[in-house]
Amino acid sequence: MVDFYKHKNLILFDGICNLCNGAVQYIIKYDKKDVFLFAPLQSNIGKQIIKTHHIDTGKTDSILLFVPGKGISSKSTAALKIASQLGFPNNLMVVFFIVPAFIRNWAYDYIAKNRYRWYGKKDACMVPTPELRSKFLE
């Protein structure tokens, strides 16, 4: 496994999903502490992490959060952990941790299942601008 993540959290996202790409842009904007790196699930590093951690992409295909020393979170838990790092008022989303994961993930799965129909998708993964290239792994 590559040592890219020692001091950063890695967000793996669906690189062809417009909703996911919009979420990545939002996270970049509010990541004031510079704690996140990004990689599409479709990238080599994404595939490597999926394989190494035995992730079933049939069950989780939109977002994963890899935190060094703590492992991988998925679905609503990943989204809430990400929000917790984005400062006020985004970090207030952690209040939703009181909702049981099976309920949060039901809502998450419903949105994930319909994301292409509602938001569309790209033919290829997003290409970061030169200014943002350092935040993305390939």
Image: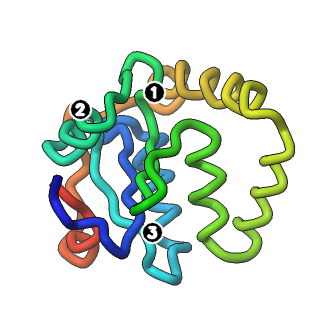
Q: At x 18% / y 48%, what residue is drawn? A: 45
Q: At x 41% / y 28%, what residue is drawn? A: 61
Which badge, 3 or 2, comes first in the chain's sequence?
Answer: 3
For the C terminus, give its image quadrant: bottom left
Residue 3 drawn at (x, y percent): 19, 65
Which of the two residues, 8 or 52, is positioned nearer the viewer here? 52
Are the residues at dot 1 and dot 3 in contact (C-beta closer than 8 Å)? no
Q: At x 41% / y 64%, what residue is drawn? A: 9
Q: Is residue 113 left or right of residue 6?
A: right
Type of residue at label 1?
Thr
Mark 2 crowd level (few <14, some 14–19, many ≥20, 10 Å Cα)? few
Type of residue at label 2?
Lys
Mark 3 crowd level (few <14, some 14–19, many ≥20, 10 Å Cα)? some
Which residue is label 2 attached to?
Answer: 51
Q: Is residue 134 left or right of residue 10?
A: left
Which of the two residues, 128 or 52, is positioned nearer the viewer here? 52
Q: Quadrant of residue 85?
A: bottom right
Type of residue at label 3?
Ile
Question: In front: mark 1 or mark 3?
Answer: 1
**Is 129 located above or below residue 52 in the figure?**
below
**Residue extending furthest bottom?**
33
- Mark 1 → mark 2, Cα distance in angstroms: 13 Å
Mark 1 crowd level (few <14, some 14–19, many ≥20, 10 Å Cα)? few
**Label placed on residue 28:** 3
Question: In front: mark 1 or mark 2?
Answer: 2
Secondary element under disc 3, as helix, strand or loop, is: helix
Secondary element under disc 2, as helix, strand or loop, is: helix
Which badge, 1 or 2, comes first in the chain's sequence?
Answer: 2
- Mark 1 → mark 3, Cα distance in angstroms: 22 Å
Q: Is residue 25 left or right of residue 2?
A: right
Which residue is label 1 attached to?
Answer: 60
Residue 49 drawn at (x, y percent): 26, 42
